[in-house]
Amino acid sequence: MDTVIHLDHLVKTYTSYGRAVPAVRDVSFDVERGELFGLFGSNGAGKSTLVRMLATLLTPTHGRATVNGFDIVRDELKVRSAIGLVASDERSFYGRLTCRQNLAFYAALQNVPRSKIAAAIERVLDLFNLTAKADVPFQSLSTGQKQRLNMARALVHDPPIVFLDEPTKSMDVQTADFVKALIKQELVGRQHKTIVFISHELYEMDNFCDRVAILADGQLKAIGTPQELSVHVPRRAIYRIEVQGDADRIAQQWRALSSIDAVTEISRGITFTAFDVTLNAETSGVWLQVLQIVGECGGRVETYRRVDDGSLRDIIKHFTRE
Amino acid sequence: MTNLKLLAFFQHGLHLARSYKLNFAARYVAAFVSVFFYFFLAQLFARHQVSVSPGVDYFTFVLIGGAFSKYVEIAMRTLADTLREEMLLGTIEPLLSTATSTTLALISPSLFILSEGTLLVFAQLIMGVLFGADFGHANWLSAIVLTILLVVCLSCLGVISAALTLRYKRRDPINWTIGAISYVFSGVFFPITALPAAMQIISAALPFTYGLHGLRGALLNGSTLINLWPDVFALLLFTAVLLPLAIIFLRGTTRYLKQSGAIGQY
Amino acid sequence: MAKLSAFFAQGWAQTASYRLDFAGRYLAMFISVLFCYVLDQLFKRSGVQQVEGSSYFTFLLIGGTFSRYLDAGLRTFAETLREEMLLGTLEPLLSTATSTRLALLGPALFLLIEGTLLVLAQLILGALFGADFSRANWFSAAIILLISLIGLAAWGIVSASFTLVFKRGDPVIWVVDAVAYVFIGVWFPVSILPPALQVISYLLPFTYALHGLRAALSSGATVIELAADLLPLLAFTVLLLPIAAWSLQSAIRRVKRSGNLALY
């Protein structure tokens, strides 16, 4: 395997009004070439600080890191020419200039040779479906288009590594799906770029990232494939079940089952009673027992649905709970 | 590569200027109106037979002062304002994450501004001639050399003020004050000898005083560089002191921004 | 009223948080008084004692002070608006339960009041430097300043509307500023201008305001004696107010229709 991003005990402490505010505390991990790497954490977990350090916009307080083999402090120019950064502020363009003019400016600053700038711009505009908007001033684009131009800017010099700081933040579902498919199939699948994808939304990472690092409170809590991470977590599932019939008796019998951890009454109506039932193992056998009890008590299951999302959320809850 | 980038910055400046056409035009209108203003102020002087120094036409005198003070304005305001605007727009972070050295990225916007400013200075001088300014004795070679020395020296101040703006996030009041001080103490409207002796010390501390004195010598009396050596020497001395200071300030500010994470915040 | 005081408090907090800026403004004022003083010395040296009925220093001081007032009035609205647009604070402001007009103009309130204070401070400083206000009729001066303020605010609103629609207000402000310096007689009496250009001066309301202010402060003209200046000033102001209201309204309408409120 070929490591392209290497973090070695990276620490960042801000000073605010004379007080030290730790933002990233001693984080180490590696990202391999061609990986779609997810960085997850809630707001303020230190994700953006971490990425800004890797993009050489911030100097680490301690520790070191390399990107594409270059030290982020000593070789910052080499690092910068190997990366594309999509920051989450989609306003960050010159509003009165056209998309093409904006991109041409950044392409020149990214060392794209003069003769190749026009072609590079066409390539990224085409990639993000923005060709029709090429000669339109940036300020007249929609928010989703601005976000896509933001990504186009990060790719105009064809960098091997791309940092995406919440790129889908203000996109509608279709655009977000389009962009994610593009990342996975085109950028990672065909062009073999390394992508670091930052998000505070879980659903974005599941079935998308190859590996996920979980940051909380500036610390690395866990890292691995979604499957690897799930091994560490006791398998549990919570279902909301609405029943008709003698609710108290049903609940009492459920509680007696060894495969059920908890039964919580959520609401009681005239005909239905809703429970949240926590299963400690999710097998068809357990389900059968749950339904059997309802039947034995002369009741009927009206609706049921899973209320936890089972996968990454549990994992993260598990790792960030302190 | 650096040349190409400078070119990109220049083109970028041109694109931006073209996108604000009205603004562009207004700058020239304002410059022309100020020539008007100098002309009528000179009329007032003539009416009351006030003269600044024997044999010198006040209109030409104040025209030179006013036109070249454009460079002070650029150094003390325009560059800092441009960077401030980039911070507000959020374009400074993408700029600094490109494969362009931080120093180059921060000072290159001044390239276009300076070129355009020079054009404006020329336009004012030419318009002055149409209004009767007398450059009959001018030594243009001296004038050009002095302009270059002045621009280099003021650019150092400009970098310092831009660094302060980046550091403190607000259009720097100090720049503003220094700008105002320059107008009064470097002799834009009157020879510094009109100032009380104690205040001429302040004049002596301003590079623009020497630049202006030298430029007036070259343009009004046709002085050669040899005649003007005290002014040339003073400008070189200022540059020798300010240049390392400018570098230290810029480095310090970049380091601060990278450590505090304040680049993107506003 | 509560909202006006909220705007005022916000303006004060904003200013107080930039102390250096605040101090810079007053220092600049000191320097400009000094500037007038030195220019006057140049005149005194050539034996000129009077320009238009007072010393050139008093003439310049009043002119300079008034032009500062003019500048504050003209710039303040447009500049604060532009800053809010850039910061993106304009949209949240406009989405509060405050009328669009108040929201747009409120932020400038504090700066206008501070501008008036600066005018007073500059006159006092000028007196210390030897400006002669011994015959001043302060009542007339106050009346003129008050009407000018209303007129200026109207001007300011027009330029703010311009900023809203065109996203950049400065071009117009620059030109008006530059024109004002030449034509309203800040530095030299209007009579210096060729008659053809004096026509422009007499089309500008602030020519009358400045002329009247000088008469009130240096020769103690009463309100009745100032009628010739006050009437045109008043007429301009009355004319300008509906124009200001109309331009603000149509700017808001235009911006709301095109939807580009937070642009830059």
Image (spheres, coloured by chain):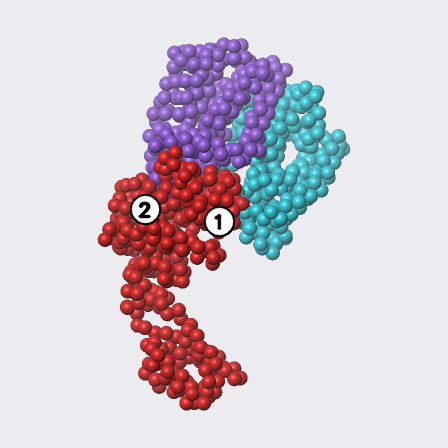
Chain colours: A red, B purple, C cyan
At horizontal 37% and vertical 39% (from top left) the residue drawn is A110
Residue closer to the observer: A270 or C32: A270
Look at the numbered disc 1 and give the secondary structure of its residue.
helix
In-front residue for pair C156/C161: C161
Q: Residue at x 53, y 26 (%)?
A: C35
Q: Are marks 2 and 1 in contact (CB under 8 Å)?
A: no
Q: Secondary structure at mark 2?
A: loop
Q: Residue at x 69, y 26 (%)?
A: C200
Residue B82 falls left or right of residue A191: right
Determine crowd level at label 1: few under 14, some 14-19, many 20+ residues with C-alpha closer than 10 A: some
Examine the image and state in which quarter residue C85 appears.
Answer: top right
| Alpha carbon distance from label 2 to label 1 | 23 Å
Does residue C34 show up? yes
List the single residue furthest toward the front: A190
Q: Which residue is mark 2?
A: A160
| Left or right for C220, reference A289 | right
Q: Label 1 lies in what chain?
A: A
Amino acid type at circle 2 is Pro
In which image quadrant can residue C191 be found?
Answer: top right
Image position of B8 with respect to B230: above or below: below
Image mark for residue A145: 1
* Mark 2 Cα-neighbour bin, 10 Å: few <14, some 14–19, many ≥20: many
> In which chain is the residue bearing label 2?
A
